[in-house]
Image: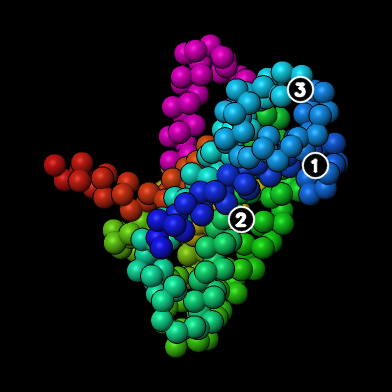
Amino acid sequence: MGAFLFAVSFIFGTIIGSFINVLVDRIDTKESPFRGRSFCPYCHKTLAWWEMVPVLSYFFLKGRCSLCKKKIPRQYPVVEFVSGLIFALLFWRFSNFDFFNLIFSGVFSWEKVLIFFDLILWFYWASVLIAISVYDFKKYLILNQVLLPAIVISFFWKIFLGIVAKFNPSFFLLNSFLRTNFLGDKNYLFGNYSFFISLALGIISFGGTISLISWLTKEKAMGWGDALLAFFLGIILGWPNSLLALIFSFLIGGVVSFFAIIARKKTMKSYLPFAPFLSIASLTIVLFGDIIIKGYLSILLI
Ligand SMILES: [Zn+2]
């Protein structure tokens, strides 16, 4: 059952990845990503079903359009595969927590529905991060049309979950779920925070820091779009995950800038899209936060 759901998550992710590619490419032309069949951007040939299978079609077609033989951008298979991988890892992550086995066994309860819906929302939030990263990477802009609804949905969902857990102490599963931290059993190092304090500190620490940098550097290092993305990340991560994700994004950003300058692709002045770093760092903490903390502590203790 676990392996089957893991595979389903991967396939579901590649399909969403394929949708993200279409969304990112069509959003500037105001075409709906939901309407109209996919077509080759060069010769406008409508794609057959076997030309639209995520990841696999790219290899069947040897990376070229079947009619005009123009090259299909690598963005397509890469985004599809990465989305599948992230979805599969999210499922693996959530199944690692004790409560997840409980959701699929035993009697029905509303708290199980809420926790399952939370996993679905994590799929949605990961998709938002992928779409924003791809678009920022290509155009150096944050996709507000995608980010703003995600901020509203995530904020109200977190508030709702917190209220339900507070006023229904009998929702034991939900309470233990809310306490489950991506940093695992070493979370105590950062202190114990209630759900709403964690949410508030997450927003202030992540969103506040990036806003401050954006303001101090007059948007030269990071823009207000990045700050808005950081507010979203603060909401979905909470404290202290937000702190680690913030540190991690600067580490990744620093290392990538260093190599980009060495490779002379970028000078110190040219702009580096920061949304991919923020997104990669945040997803890394969500997926491997406990492993990273444990690894770091074991290095310190040697
Ligand atoms: Zn073509």
From the image, which quarter does the C terminus lie in? top left
The answer to whether any part of residue 217 appears in the image is no
Q: Which residue is mark 3?
A: 67
Q: In the rendering, at what x and y percent does residue 166 appear? A: 50, 82
Q: Which residue is mark 1?
A: 37
Of circles 2 and 1, which is in front? Answer: 1
* Residue 78 visible in the current orientation: yes
The amino acid marked with disc number 2 is Tyr
Q: Residue at x 44, y 45 (%)?
A: 284
Q: Which residues are magenta?
A: 248-276
Task: Indicate which disc, 2 or 1, sits on the residue closer to the N terminus.
Answer: 1
Residue at image coords 79%, 27%: 41
Amino acid type at image mark 1: Arg
Q: Is residue 252 a member of the stretch shown in magenta?
A: yes
| Residue located 58% across and 61% down the image | 121
209, 106: nearer the viewer: 106
Distance from mark 3 CB to nearest ligand 1 atom below 8 Å: yes
